[in-house]
Image (spheres, rainbow, N blue to C red):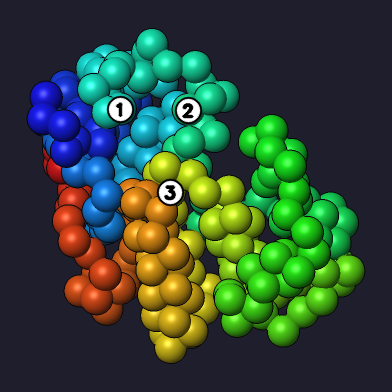
Amino acid sequence: MTTDLLFAIRELRVNNIINVNHLDIKKDKVTCITGESGAGKSTLLKTLNKMITPDSGEIFYKGTSLKEIDSVQHRRKVIMLSQVPLIFPGTIKDNLIMGYKLNGKKPCDDEILKQAIHNMQMTKELHEDAGTLSGGEKQRLALARILLLKADVYLLDEPTSALDEDTEMMILEYFIREIKKKQASLLMITHSNTVNEQFAEERIYLSQSNGQ
């Protein structure tokens, strides 16, 4: 396998949803995943994150089979964010530092946390209850949380679906600019043609007929 590959997928079968014979995903790229409803886009991301184990086939991450990689360590490097992000009970600050706790890292100071939510166009304070946030604010809080963690790979499932298009483009432009500085890779499911056209460096289309 060539050294520029992030994931190499071979003969992958998952729950009669995904049927992918051969798919290479390049590292250091923004890859947008589009396709039909029910074609397995979210399932694909979960297999790359080791949240779902394939029925058959194999996935290689940077040349090493996922079967040989510790799941917890893998998820600390390859972070996934669902379309409806997990928001923990407590304040905005509690949610931001939870990412550090789960990844075994020391939290940043409050000024960095404040800047993180400001960068996501949030006019909120760290002490405010995260449970009162709107759907779009929760998505932005979750994006701020994972961006603080400096992962190698970000797997995002429609991360800005609750935002209006102008805010969506602004948030994604900032997010992508920041991960590029860290030479991280991004795989993102989107139903937005605008997002796909604006940001995709690589594209994957999934269909119900064959999963790819």
Q: CA distance from mark 2 to mark 1?
A: 9 Å
Depth check, front residue: 18 or 145: 145
Kindly identify the residue that appears in the image at 41 percent across and 54 percent down.
Answer: 182
In the picture shown, does residue 166 fall above or below 172? Answer: below
- Mark 3 lies on a secondary structure that is strand
Kindly identify the residue that appears in the image at 45 percent across and 38 percent down.
Answer: 78
Q: Which residue is mark 1?
A: 61
Q: Which residue is mark 3?
A: 154
Q: Earlier in the sequence, mark 1 or mark 3?
A: 1
Verify CB contact (< 8 Å) between mark 2 and mark 1.
yes
Verify CB contact (< 8 Å) between mark 2 and mark 3.
no
Can residue 68 be seen in this snapshot? yes
- Mark 1 lies on a secondary structure that is strand
| Residue 173 falls in image quadrant | bottom left
Q: Quadrant of the N terminus?
A: top left
In the picture shown, does residue 58 fall above or below 138? Answer: above
Depth check, front residue: 163 or 117: 117
Kindly identify the residue that appears in the image at 38 percent across and 68 percent down.
Answer: 177
Pointer 2: residues within 10 angstroms few (<14), some, or many (20+)?
Answer: some
Can residue 20 be seen in this snapshot? no
Q: CA distance from mark 2 to mark 3?
A: 12 Å
Name the kind of residue labelled 1 in the image.
Answer: Tyr
Name the kind of residue labelled 3 in the image.
Answer: Tyr
- The label shown at residue 74 is 2
Name the kind of residue labelled 2 in the image.
Answer: His
Q: Earlier in the sequence, mark 2 or mark 3?
A: 2
Percent x, y of residue 68 = 38, 11
